[in-house]
Amino acid sequence: MSGPEMETVVLAGNPNVGKTTLFNALTGSSAKVGNFAGVTVDLKLGETFTPHGRKLRVVDLPGCLSLDGQAPDQQITRRAIHGKIDELGAPDLAICVLDASNLERHLILALEVIESGLPVVVALNMVDVAESAGIRLDPVVMSEELGVPVVPIQADKSKGIVELKQSIRHPLPPAADATWADSKRPIEARQEFALRLCRLAARRPDVHQSTRSDRIDAQLLHPVLGWVYLVVIMFAVFWSIFSFAAVPMGWVEAAQGWLEGIVENSMAEGDLRDLIVSGIIGGVGSVVIFLPQILILFFFIGLLESSGYMARAAFLMDGLMSKVGLSGKAFLPLLSSYACAIPGIMATRSIDSAKERLTTIFVAPWMSCTARLPVYFLLIPMLLGGSEGGFTQALVLLAIYVFGTLSAFLVARILRGKLGPDEQPRHFTLELPPYRQPQWGYVFRHLVSRGWSFLRKAGTVIMGISIVLWALSTYPKTESEDPAEQLEASAMGRISAVIEPVVRPLGFDGRTGTAVLTSFAAREVFNASMFQLFEVEEIEDDEAGSRDRLRATLAAETWEDGSRMFRPLTVLSLLIFYIYALQCLPTSAVTAREAGSWKWAAGQFVFMTAVAAIGSLLVYQIGSALGF
Amino acid sequence: MMAEWQTWAALGVVALAVVLLVRRAIKRRRGCGGDCGCGPSSRNRKH
């Protein structure tokens, strides 16, 4: 914790001006950044040193257009500036981060902060973008007019950071006189001053120059072509997952086989050896095998975020979302939910309307999250019979994402209708940032963070549950040498027998139903459960990895009448269940906290699980009736 | 004898796993605790 002598500097500015990038450059942190608005919805704390070695506490505030906003994240910014957050106390200085290519709009917030009486330093970010648009910047004149230091920077390239630190050396600059302030018409006074200042110190060329971003946007934001590009880009990402991952997945499988070999060769036969080989290495391996596919997905998502394309995707989606009663502000929370519903639900804090916020929280878990991916990666090749290439698999994955998203929009439409209109109409202004070279450092850090989180979960929760599942499928023991009879007599076998009548109409046998049931602890557990429950070690091909062995076992499974158990219709029924079911306790906890009531979390869980079960039932029963 | 020793050791590992899972569930009931990959650092962990 900071001592009382440490001064506090807050970073304020409009959304997507690079505050978090500057925060990372100042503090050496690796907080998430993105080339779109609304990445920061909470306070981030860090520390930095001035050139004279004085330590400062740095606070990254959520972006906002004005200090008058009512959204939860904007209230945080206002309270932080006014020193009303107890944990922070009164700040000693504000660094107002402005996008140099859009000063007319972004100066307004800086003027408000200066009016608050807080000492201010203006960081003029993205000067390279402004200059390439032909804007002639004059920081000296700007500084004289505002009465505060103005420092040009390029936060993404760490340029100007030393000069910025020089400007906040001790003693801190004094608070400036707000010469433009007019208590009777404050908004107009700020706008007039900002326009006058831009004419003096940020002169635009007389003729509008078409920038590179304008030319790209003419294609990517075209009303028809824009959607084609969006689908093609997402398809290409999904195709690359299935096409490029085969080799690294082979490495993971080889490592798994090598580990199993070491244990089997160095230990006598017994329960502990079986636990290590089947329960730990096999169970965890059936999830970890999909790490390369997840890393490839997040590499491309990082590229799209960093380049500025995601803001264009939000622009395209805005029209569609307005039809279901959601504004463009709901896009980022929903986009974040594709990685994990938890940060997505937290990101709804940027939504002003309480009704729109509740709606977004309610439907966010239907965006296909990372935890579903190992299940999809196991099931999609089974759906296609295992012989299809990356092209068809990518199409199925794209369809799953589209299906989940459209279902979420449909429920949002119904829910918005039930909750009624907002008391005051809300307006959402989406700023399109210029296209930028991807920040490779950010993409890499994003990748490492995602990969590490996946591995950590596999090595803790998934491994723990896998060990318990092994025990349930091993004990109590029988005298029989037949593994099938042993499994039938085990606790897991008995649970399977009890739930089989319930899950049979969905197309699942008792073991698959048990695997689905256990995956309510964490979705990925489905793979580990299937590995435990279907005696995968009985496959003859010793060279095959866990993924192939599991698929081969499942493909050979039959019902009592000799018909195939895992025909495409059964796999489709399973996929439908996993698209819709809410199998994530932490998501329910965060929903309860953010919505302010456990009733919302309970309603969300019951509704999503009911839709999943009914969807699977309908698909299987109708499909069976049609002869599939 | 060896098989019996392995059974007790395996049951010990299972018991340990159960204890750690329950402990984790109680500690993390307020949110993801970082498992989701949303990247909270130890200093900023608010969920």
Image (cartoon, rainbow, N blue to C red):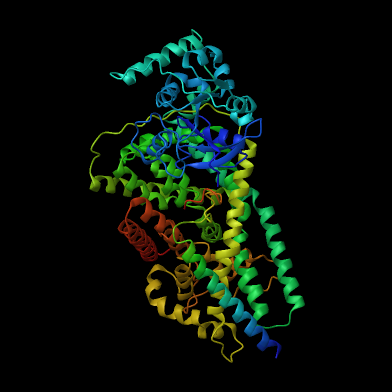
Q: Is residue A253 left or right of residue A350?
A: right
A18 relative to A411, above or below? above
The picture quadrant where one finds residue A627 is bottom left
A399 relative to A9, above or below? below
Q: Is residue A578 among what the camera can see?
A: no
- In the image, farthest residue toward the top: A206
- In the rendered image, residue A143, in percent from the top left (x then y), is placed at 52, 16
Q: Nearer the viewer, residue A328 or A511?
A: A328
Q: Nearer the viewer, residue A137 or A519?
A: A137
Q: Is residue A369 among what the camera can see?
A: yes
Q: Nearer the viewer, residue B11 or A14?
A: A14
Dividing the image into 4 quarters, which one contains the C terminus of chain A?
bottom left
Count the labels in the image: 0
A499 relative to A572, above or below? below
Q: Nearer the viewer, residue A463 or A14?
A: A14
The picture quadrant where one finds residue A53 is top right
- In the rendered image, residue A526, in percent from the top left (x then y), is placed at 51, 66
Q: Is residue A250 left or right of residue A42?
A: right
- In the rendered image, residue A255, in percent from the top left (x then y), is placed at 71, 62
Residue at 30% x, 20% y is A183
- In the image, farthest residue toward the front: A5
Residue at 37% x, 14% y is A192
A304 relative to A250, above or below? above
Residue at 63% x, 68% y is A549
The picture quadrant where one finds residue A263 is bottom right
- In the rendered image, residue A608, in percent from the top left (x then y), is placed at 36, 58
